[in-house]
Amino acid sequence: MEKIRFGIVGIGMMGRMHATSLQRNPHAEVVAVCARTESKVKAFQEEFGVPYGYTNVDELVNNPEVDAIVVATGADAHKAPCLAACKAKKHIFCEKPLAKTLEDCEEIEKAVAENGSKCFTVGFMRRFDPSYAEAKEKIRAGAIGKPILFKGVSLDPSSVLEAHLEGVKKGIYVPWFIEMGSHDTDLARWFLEGDPVDSFATGDAYVCTGLADYNDYDNGFSLTRFDNNTTAYIQVGRTATCSHVESEIVGTKGTLRVNSVPRKNYLSQFTENGFVEECQESFLARWGEAFQAEIDDFVDCVRTGRKPETTAHDGTMSLKFCLQLHQAYLDGKKK
Amino acid sequence: MEKIRFGIVGIGMMGRMHATSLQRNPHAEVVAVCARTESKVKAFQEEFGVPYGYTNVDELVNNPEVDAIVVATGADAHKAPCLAACKAKKHIFCEKPLAKTLEDCEEIEKAVAENGSKCFTVGFMRRFDPSYAEAKEKIRAGAIGKPILFKGVSLDPSSVLEAHLEGVKKGIYVPWFIEMGSHDTDLARWFLEGDPVDSFATGDAYVCTGLADYNDYDNGFSLTRFDNNTTAYIQVGRTATCSHVESEIVGTKGTLRVNSVPRKNYLSQFTENGFVEECQESFLARWGEAFQAEIDDFVDCVRTGRKPETTAHDGTMSLKFCLQLHQAYLDGKKK
Amino acid sequence: MEKIRFGIVGIGMMGRMHATSLQRNPHAEVVAVCARTESKVKAFQEEFGVPYGYTNVDELVNNPEVDAIVVATGADAHKAPCLAACKAKKHIFCEKPLAKTLEDCEEIEKAVAENGSKCFTVGFMRRFDPSYAEAKEKIRAGAIGKPILFKGVSLDPSSVLEAHLEGVKKGIYVPWFIEMGSHDTDLARWFLEGDPVDSFATGDAYVCTGLADYNDYDNGFSLTRFDNNTTAYIQVGRTATCSHVESEIVGTKGTLRVNSVPRKNYLSQFTENGFVEECQESFLARWGEAFQAEIDDFVDCVRTGRKPETTAHDGTMSLKFCLQLHQAYLDGKKK
Amino acid sequence: MEKIRFGIVGIGMMGRMHATSLQRNPHAEVVAVCARTESKVKAFQEEFGVPYGYTNVDELVNNPEVDAIVVATGADAHKAPCLAACKAKKHIFCEKPLAKTLEDCEEIEKAVAENGSKCFTVGFMRRFDPSYAEAKEKIRAGAIGKPILFKGVSLDPSSVLEAHLEGVKKGIYVPWFIEMGSHDTDLARWFLEGDPVDSFATGDAYVCTGLADYNDYDNGFSLTRFDNNTTAYIQVGRTATCSHVESEIVGTKGTLRVNSVPRKNYLSQFTENGFVEECQESFLARWGEAFQAEIDDFVDCVRTGRKPETTAHDGTMSLKFCLQLHQAYLDGKKK
C-alpha cells in the first residue's frame, strides 16, 4: 500500500504536533519540511527522519514526491504556501485561522476552487473531538430538536498573560476574538447552520491592562444574531484558573454540553477543601485526540477522494465572524 | 416574647407559601388575610388558623393588631397595598417584581422613603438561597477577585408553555424577560455592583409560536454592558427539559457556579442510557429553603430594626433592567 | 382540628431537634418535656413554650394530656421510657439504636407488641430522606432488577475524634459499627429485604490510636453474607475530610447511588486547585429534611392509625447486625 | 538511532493492540510475529508490515534480529515463550495474568531471575493510566496520609454474558476473580504496599445462572485483610450497564477516586430523563492511553536499562491473591 507523502510547512508547536500525528497514521509519512532557518530544518529532519528539507516553500511544493502539505506557519504566512500548493496540484491541510485578512482568505478560496480535484481543509480540530463529533451526530439525529443557541466559552489560564502581552507588542499575536475565537465562530456556524448578522460585544483588559493600548483585551463577551433566527454567545478569556473550553448547544427539545467541568483525567479527590477535580492545564492535553483524528480524516480524504467537510469558505466565514466580534468590541469601547 | 403579627395580601400560590413560611418562624404569626373573594378568604383563614379576614386591603393594613404585611398579589396590584401600608406605618414584604411599570415603582419607592423607620423589602429570594448567599460571601472575601461577568440562565420546563400562552392572551402574564428575568436582573446588579447601560437581545417564540403575536417569546438571550465596565449575560426560556436556574459569576481570579447541574436530590443512577441524575421539576422544590430564609430574615429585621438589604430601589432598578432587555428584544425583531 | 400532643424525653441535641421538627408540623405540639436536671428542663420549657416539665419520666408518660412521646435519651436509657409509655398506652417515637443490648431490645419489642394499637417506630431517618425514599421506590418499581449488593459508607470528619475518645473513656459512646453502623445495618436490611448470616470485618484505630484500648476503632470495613444470597458492604469511619454518608444499591439491571459526592449546596468553584465542590460539614445539615419527614410521617401515623413502616423488630435486628459486625472486627483482631 | 525490534507472540485482540502501540512508538518496530495458524500469521505480517512470521515460538525468540518479545497468548500459554525468551536472553513484556497456576508463575519468576540483565514486566496497564499514575504519585507525596483501604470495582456490561458462558463451557475462560480480578489484586498490592492475609467473599451467578455449574459467577464481592493492617475490597461483575472500572484509595488524611462516573467523553445532555452522561462501552476505549503508556515505558526501559516497576513477582502475587479470592468465594458457597 502506498503512503501519502506529506510536506510540513512551519516547524513551530503546531508543525511538530502535526508531524507527530502523521507519523502515527499508518497511511501517511512525512517526507519534506520547510522553514526559514536552515539549522532548524535540519534538526527537524533529524528528529522526525524526514528526507527533504527546504527553506523555500516553492521547492517543497514542487517536489514530485510530495503529495500533500500541512501549512502550520503563522496566520499571515498561510497564503503563499497555499497558493503555491494549489498551483502545484497538491492536497492542503491549512491551520486555522485561514489567514489574517478577508482578502487573503478570498484569494486562497479562489485558488482552492481552481485546484478543485485536490483536498483542502482548515484545521478546526474541535469538529473532530469525539465529544463534539458526537454532539453533532446527536443533533443531526434530532436529539435536541432545532438548535437555537450556541454558547462557546474558550478560556486560557492567566499564567500566559504576560508572555502574550509581549507577543502583542511585537505584532505576533492577534486579538483574542480572532485567535481563540476562530474555533468558536466555526463551531457556531457548524452547529447553528447559519451565518452571523449583527453582534454586540463587551469586555476589557481587566487584568493585563497593558493590552488595552493595542486594542486587545483579556476577556471578551459577545452575542450575535444569526441569519436563521438563531443566536451565538461567544466568550473568550485569558484570565482563567485553567485551560477551559466549554460549549453548549441549546435546542428546542434538549441541550448538549461539552466539557462543562474541564477534568484533567478520571481522578477526583476528597480533601480538606472539599471534593476536588483538577482541571485541564493546556490545550494540547485537551485536544490531542482531536488533532490526531483531524489528520487521520484528512489522510483518509486524500486516499479515498472524499472531500473534507471543512472548506476554505468555512475558513473565510470564520474569520469574517471573528472580525465582526472584534469590531463590535471596539465599537462598544467608543461609546 | 412577642410575635410579629402578619397580614397576607393575596392568597395565590405565593401568598400560601409565605403563610406557611411564617408559620414555621417561631417569632411570627399570621393574623390577617385579604383577597377579593370572601369565600376564599374564609377558607384560607380556616386552613391557616387566621383570625382576621378581609376583602378590602385598607381594612387589613389599618388593623392595629397587624404589624407587617406580605404583598403577594399580581404585580399590577402591588402598589395599592404598599402605599396603604406605608401610610399606616406598617412593615412591608412585597413580592417581585415590585410593580409592572416604572411609574408605580417610583411611587412605591417614594412612599417607602416617607415610611422610613419601617422595614421594606422585595422578595428576591434567590439572594437568600444558601448557595447564592455563600457565593456573595466568597466574592466579598475576595475569592474570585473582581467580578467581571454575571451569567444568569433561568429556564422553565416546556410542560407549562400552553397554559402560559393562555395567560398571555388574557393579559395576566408579562413577557419572560420581565417575569423570570426580574430575578436575574437583580442578581446581576447584586453580584456586579453596577447598573446596566446598553443591551442587545435575541430569541424568539420557537416552540410556542403563538406567543409572537403578543410580543412574547419562549426563549430570550441578552448581553448587557454595565456602567462599571462589567457585563451581564441573561438567558430566559420556557422550553427546557426541567426547571433550571443556573448562574455563574466570573471574576478576575476565579469563577463561581450555582446549580450547573440542577439535581433533584442526592440520588444518581447507572442505567442503560448512562449515568443519570434526575433534575429539578419545579421552582418550589428548588427554592423552598430560600423562601423560608428570606421570610426569616425579614422577621428578624422587623424584630431588631435592622434594615433589609434588598430595597425598594432595587425593585425599581430590577424592573428597569427587565424592561430594557425586553425593549432590546423588540428592537432586534424590527431589524 | 386537634393537634397530637407530644412529650419529649431527653433534651440533648436530638431532643431539641425533634422539638423543632414537631413545632414545624401543623398537626403536632410539644406539651411536655423530661430530663434529669430541673434547671435544664425549665430552660427548655421557656425556649420552646412547653407547659409541662418533669424530671421523672413516669410522670410525663402518665400525663393524660400527652398523646405521644419522643425518646431522645442515650441508647441505654431508651428502655425505661419505652416500657412506661407502652404501659400508659402512648404512641412512641424512639431514637436509634433501639437499645444497647439485644435483651433490652427484646423487652421493648414485647412491650410494644402488647401496646399493639398504638404507633411505635425507631428513628432511622435515612429511610425518609427524599433520595433514599426515591431509591426504594425505584427498586420497588423494578428499576434495577433484583438488588444483590448494598454498599453503605458512613464517615464523620476527623475533627471530632479527640472528643470522641474522651466520650469512650467515660463509657458514653459505643463503638462505631454500633453507633453509626445502626443506620447502615437498617438500610442494608431495608434494601436487600433479608437478614445477615456471617460477617468479616477489618479496620483499626489508625489515627486515634487510643481507641484501641477500648476495643474501638476509627475505621471499620465489613462484608456480610445475607440469608437471601445478597451481600452488604458496610464501612464506617471517623477520619474523613467531611461528613460523608454514601450508599449504593447494585441490582441485576442497574445501580443506584446516594450522595456519592457529598455536596454542601449547589455552589461550585473554579479555583487554582481545580474544580471544587465544598462538602457537607455535619450530619444535621445533610439530614435536616429527613428528620422533618420522619417526624411528619410519625405524626401522620398517629393521626390516621396507619402503622409506621419501621418497627421495633427492625430496631432489634439492626442492633443484632451491628453487634455481629463489631464481633467480626474483634475476632479479626485476635488472629 | 536504533529501534528496539519486537516479536509478538499471539495475534488475538491483545497482540494486535500491542502491535499497534509499538508502531506508534518511535523507538520500536515489530519485526516478527508468531501464532499457531500460518495463514493468520501471514495476514498479520501483511497488515502490520512485519518481515518475519513463525508458527514456532522458539524460532521467533532465537531470531537474532529480535530484541524483545510481547507475550499476548492465552494465560496458560505464557510460560513456554517466557522460558524460551529468557533462555535466549530477550526482553519480555508478558500479558496478565502471568500464568494460570502458581507453579507456572514461579517457574517464570525463576527463569526471569536467571535472565537478570534483561527487562521483564507484566501488563498491568492500569498502573500506566494517567489517573492511576497520578493517584500513586499523590500518595507518595503524602496527599492522603497513610492508605488504609483500597476499593476496586471492575464491571463488564451484561451484553457479553452469554458469550462468556460459552467460553467457560469450552474451558477458555477463568472465573472472574482471576481474569478481571488480576488487575484489582495488583492495584491493591501497589497502593497498599502489602500482601493479602485472609479473605471473605460472596456473590453468585445471579443473571447468567449457568455459570454456577462451572464454579463461576457473574458477581463477586470480597474483603481482604492485608499483612500491614490495611484492607482491600474487591468487587467484580459482568452484569453492569456499561464497562465500569472504579477505584478508591482511602487514606488517613484524604481519599482518591478514579473513574467514579465512567464518562464516555466530555459530552453531557439535558434530556427528558434528566442530566445524562453516557458511559464507557468497552475496556479498549477506557484504557487506550494506558496501553500505549505501558508499552512506551517498556520500550524506554529496554533502551535505557532501567528496570520495569512491575516484576514477575508482582505477577505471581497478583495471581495468588486472585486464587485466594476465588477460593474464599467457593468456601462461602459450601457453607
Image: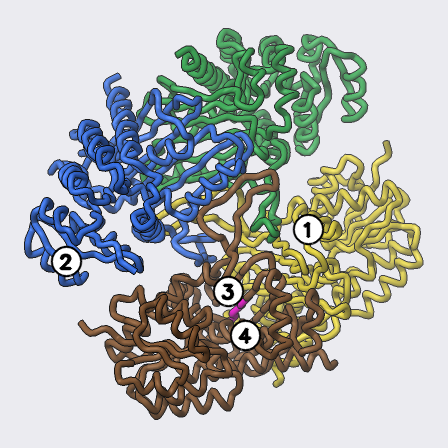
Chain colours: A green, B blue, C brown, D yellow
Q: Is residue B301 visible?
A: yes
Looking at the rendered structure, the kind of residue marked 2 is Phe
Looking at the rendered structure, the kind of residue marked 3 is Ser
- Report helix, strand or loop for mark 1: helix
Residue C335 locus on image (x, y percent): 74, 81
Q: Does the magenta stretch include residue C151?
A: yes
Residues in magenta?
C149-153
Q: Name the residue under label 1.
A: D135
Taking the image as shown, residue C321 lies to the left or right of residue D45, namely: left
Chain letter of the residue beneath label 3 in the structure image:
C
Q: Name the residue under label 2.
A: B44
| Real-space Cα separation, disc 4 to disc 3, in angstroms | 17 Å
Looking at the rendered structure, the kind of residue marked 4 is Glu
4 and 1 marks on the same chain: no
Q: Which mark is residue A309?
A: none
Q: Which residue is drawn at 76% across and 42% down?
A: D296
- Badge count: 4
Q: Does the magenta stretch include residue C296?
A: no
Nearer the viewer's eye, disc 4 or disc 2? 2
Residue C141 locus on image (x, y percent): 36, 67
Q: Which residue lies furthest to the left in this view?
A: B38
Q: Mark 4 points at which residue?
A: C179
- Report helix, strand or loop for mark 3: strand
Disc 2 crowd, CA 10 A, few/some/many (<14, 14-19, 20+): many
